Amino acid sequence: MQIDHLARVYRYDGIDLPQPPHLANDPQGLRAYHATLYPAILNADLVDAGVTGGVHVTEYRRAVGTKG
């Protein structure tokens, strides 16, 4: 049996977002940090995109809908 440690990548609109080490294990803190860069992340859905190229990708996807 072999255990592979995967790096985690957070992606928004095709852009890999930075992850400060002190927020690596705090999903809500990380979302708040990323929202300072892209405010639409506050309303986005967090979707597990699976493993691609040896990294575990998690994507913020904008909620699609109508206003009013």
Image (cartoon, grey):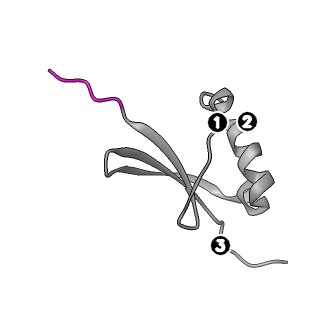
Residue extent of the magenta highlight? 1-5
Give the CA separation, mark 2 to mark 3. Answer: 24 Å
User: What's the amino acid at mark 1?
Assistant: Pro
Quarter location, residue 45: bottom right
User: What's the amino acid at mark 2?
Assistant: Gly
Q: Residue at x 63, y 30 (%)?
A: 21
The N terminus, quarter of image: top left
Q: Residue at x 62, y 47 (%)?
A: 18
**Residue 35 place in picture, x, y as percent:** 76, 53
User: What's the amino acid at mark 3?
Assistant: Val
Cβ atoms at labels 2 and 1 below 8 Å apart = yes
**Residue 40 place in picture, x, y as percent:** 75, 63
Quarter location, residue 66: bottom right
Find numbered disc 1 in the image and state the secondary structure of the residue it sits on: helix
Name the residue that disc number 3 marks. Answer: 64
Find numbered disc 2 in the image and state the secondary structure of the residue it sits on: helix
Name the residue that disc number 1 marks. Answer: 27
Q: Residue at x 70, y 45 (%)?
A: 31
Residue 68 included in the magenta stretch of the image: no
The C terminus, quarter of image: bottom right
